[in-house]
Structure formats: C-alpha cells, structure tokens
Image (spheres, rainbow, N blue to C red):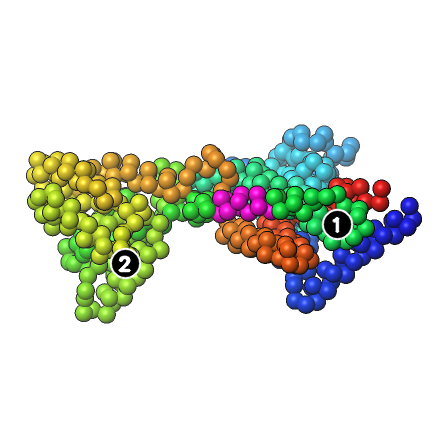
Amino acid sequence: MIVMLSSIYRGVWRAAAARTLRTSRGTPPCRFLPTFDGPPVGLADADTIFALSSGHGRCGVAVIRASGPASATALKCMAGLTRGLPPPRTALLRSITDPKTKEVLDRGLVLWFPAPHSFTGEDSAEFHIHGGSAVITAVLQALGSVPGMRPAEAGEFTRRAFQAGKLGLTEVEGLGDLIHAETEAQRRQALRQMSGELGQLYQDWSHRLKRCLAHVEAFIDFSEDELIEDGVLNHVDRSVCDLQEEMERHLKDERRGERLRSGVQVVIAGATNAGKSSLLNTLCQRPAAIVSPIAGTTRDVVETALDIGGFPVLLSDTAGLRESPDLVEREGVRRARERVEQADLTLVVVDCAHLPTEAQQAAAFLQGHLRSVLPTQEQPETDRCLLVLNKTDLLPQEQRQKLARELGRVSGLPPVSLISCHTDEGLQDFLTVLHSSVKTLCGDPLSGAPTLTQARHRAHLQQCFTALAQYQQYRDIDLALAAEGVRLALTSLGRITGRVGAEEILDIIFKDFCIGK
C-alpha cells in the first residue's frame, strides 16, 4: 500500500514537473484566477464597506447598505438596538442616530442579514431612509465615523459576492446588464443570464474539460504501470469532439446576444434630399437633424437611441451619397459609406419622385440604387436592408397602390415600405417591418439556448476552441502537448466563469480511477 501511494505521488510530482517545464518554455501556466483588477478583496478582509445602494438624486426612499464584520456594530449603535440585533431579514422601524453626537438623523427601517445568507455572503445591514440629499449625506457621514468602516469602491459589493461564491462571473455581468437595461428585451436577456443559465452551460463544459484533462494526465503518469482502464483516451476523444461541436454552434449565433446588449446599429442611407433626416426626426419624434431643401445639408453622422418594440436601436442619419467637389461633404460621404459597412441594418431611402412610372423599370432602378448604396459586392445583402420609398404624398393614390402591389411581386428586392414623413402615411406599417427585422437580428432572449452577450466571452471561447484543435493535432504525436491543449482550453473557459482550480484536476484523477487497487 505504501509503495503504491509512493507511485501515485511520484506520478503527481511528474505531472507538476512537466507543467513547470512547459511553463518555463513559454507556455502560460495553469492559472484559473478571477479576472478582476486590483488587490483581492474577500471575506477575510478587515474592512466593512458601506454605500448608497439606491439611485442618486431626490427620491422617496433611499437604501444604504453596509457589509462586513462591523455591520452589526453600526446597526446597533445607529438604530439604538440595546437588546441585540433584530431577527434576520425582518424590517424594524427605528430612529437613525449619529453614534457620536446621538443626534437623530432620520426615522426609517433597518434590516439585518447575517452571514452567509446575504448578498455578499458577509454580515450585512441595510438602512431604508428618506431620499433627501441632506438625510443621505448625514447617514453616510455617521457610518463613516464607526470604527472599521469605509466607503465602498465601485462594484465592491458585487465583487465580494463573487468571491464568496454567491455569484459567478457571468451572473455578475448579467446583474450589471440588468441594472443598465433600457428596453424590455435587454431586461429579459440580462435576467436570464443573471439567473445563471449561461454560467451553468459554461460550468458544464468546464467540468467535462476537467474530466478530459484528468484522464489524459492519468494516462500519461500511470499507463506504464497498467493502472488505467482501457479506452480512456477514446472516451477523451469523443468528449473533445462533442465539446467542439457544441462550442461551434454556440459561437455561430450571428452576435444576437451582443447586438441585443449594445443595440442594433441601424443606418439611414441614400441619395441627397431623399428625406433621410426627415425619417430620423419622424422616428425619434424630435428635431434631431436639420432638415432643409438644400441638397447636402447633413454632413456628419447624427445618432439617436431608440426603443423599437422593446429592442434597443442606435439609429444613424448619414450624408447623402453623391460625388461632390466640396471637401467637407466628401468626408461626410466617406463616413456615411463606412457606417453602412458597419451597420446591422441599412434603411435605404429613395425619393418616390425619382422612380420610373413602370413597375419593372422601377424595380430595375431600385436594384441599381441598392448596389450604389450598399457595400461593394456581387449581390447586396437584402436581408440586412429595408427599402424606404419616401414622399409618397407627392404621388397620386392610384399610382402609390399600383407601385406597392407590383414591387411586392418582384424577387431580389428587400422589404419595401412606402411612407410619407410629411403626412406620416405608411409609417405604422414601416415600423412593423422595422420591428420584425430588428427582432430577427436580436432573436428572442427567452427561447432556445442562452446566447453570448459579451465580446470577452466570444474571445475566450474562440481561444478554447483553438486549444481543443491542438489536442486533436497532437493526440497521436505527443500526448503531453495534446494534454496542454486541453489545459489551455480549460484556462480560457475558466476566464469566463472565474471558477476552476488545479486541485480539481487531481481530485478527478483519484475519484475516477481505481489507481493503486
């Protein structure tokens, strides 16, 4: 038994030595640490922090939160609790006093959250007071006079919650997105991520990668002694292939989650005097852009944020596309074309008065116009474009109806909307089409698998996918290099979740294999 344990420890030592050797040759070490900057702050930190947790500004009720070992002292001395702390999570109406002068600062509710059943996992207290600026300032100053307490840094409560294991990194980011959500779809996506669904997906992948790495390490260290079951590497091969397929599907989401989080980039483009600025002003219901009959009025990009049916949109008006001797206008046209290339959706605005009267000729004219507006390519991306025929009030009603009917039958054109920014005719139908396109670009945040919401998630997952390809490449050449590929994949995934450790690899080795029996 002693001899067998010595063999195990030698194997673990060899694995550690191999990792050290690979690290010294330039391979990043196996470190799975949270990606927060600055000094670590944890439950053992001596400071107790406090801050205004509700929004700034005058309000009916303000919430001040304290977290740390001195929270109980602050609560007792400021709420006059001579008989001890109140029952956990029970609101108690008390006079809030200054601990030094004993002056009554306000009258409000106090709550006690003992560790570990609090947001941060530490002893925490809350003061629900009136929301006037003078009251808030007085209570904050009084808390600052309690020994061992200091004002919290930005995000420090959530940081302590993460380090206490209350929240994962993806849940922390979901909480931040929920706080900053401005539309209904953003709220739904953030709430879903904060609930841990995305984190659970990554944790599942991480667990499977740890098992693969443990099996490969065990095969390297113990296979010569015939202590490992047959078919271990075949099982790893299947697991790695399955993970690659799942990650590839996850990455091919067309950036829907990121687009929903940051807003859909919608660009209004077209020739001069087509009514682009009028459309911008109509959609945002304010004079955001200057409108005049002079061609080339808009020179720079004018942006405004909109909520289209619960989805966030960043709408941009651009300069009219034409050749011009004016240097400033040429720069405006260059910026307009640059925005069109970056756009998620382009609204190509056309003046109805410039259309041929015959439907087939009008369709050919519009197809040529699309090629001149959209990025240069053989076939314009009509699924990322909407045609907006403006100034329909200048056409007879019979001609408008015929034009709409005939263009609807033409293939190869994007969805066509006939509107008048002057009379608002057709605007509601256009908004319905616009909402449908934006919803398609963002997807339904509540259906299907959870989507990527952060650029850093995508970058780390791509690194993880590449590292798994390294395993496939070196599987039959050098198993140590193949194992390093799995380790790098686990490192990349750990940077998303913030929760994976080298000790867990050894735990799986001893748990999954009957080594020494």
What amino acid is at disc 2? Thr
Rendered residue at 25%/41% (across/down): 415
* Viewport quadrant of the C terminus: top right
Residue that mark 2 sits on: 376
* Dominant secondary structure (helix, strand or loop) of the stretch shown in magenta: helix
Q: Position of residue 467 (x, y in %)?
A: 59, 55
Q: Nearer the viewer, residue 198 or 24?
A: 24
Q: Please indicate whether residue 194 sits to the left or right of residue 279 in the image.
A: right
Q: Position of residue 456 (x, y in %)?
A: 53, 53
User: How many tags in the picture?
Assistant: 2
Q: Earlier in the sequence, mark 2 or mark 1?
A: 1
Q: Position of residue 477 (x, y in %)?
A: 64, 59
Q: Position of residue 36 (x, y in %)?
A: 62, 54
Rendered residue at 66%/59% (across/down): 478
Report the span colored magenta: 240-251
Q: Please indicate whether residue 423 sits to the left or right of residue 380 in the image.
A: left
Q: Secondary structure at mark 1?
A: helix
Q: Are marks 2 and 1 in contact (CB under 8 Å)?
A: no
Q: Is residue 210 visible?
A: no
Q: Classify 53 as above or below 87.
A: below
What amino acid is at disc 1? Ala
Q: Indicate which label's residue lies in the foreground, 2 or 1.
A: 1
Q: Nearer the viewer, residue 15 or 131?
A: 15
- Is 6 colored magenta in this rendering? no
Q: Quadrant of residue 76?
A: top right
Q: Classify 297 as above or below 409.
A: below
Residue that mark 1 sits on: 218
Q: Nearer the viewer, residue 308 or 198?
A: 198
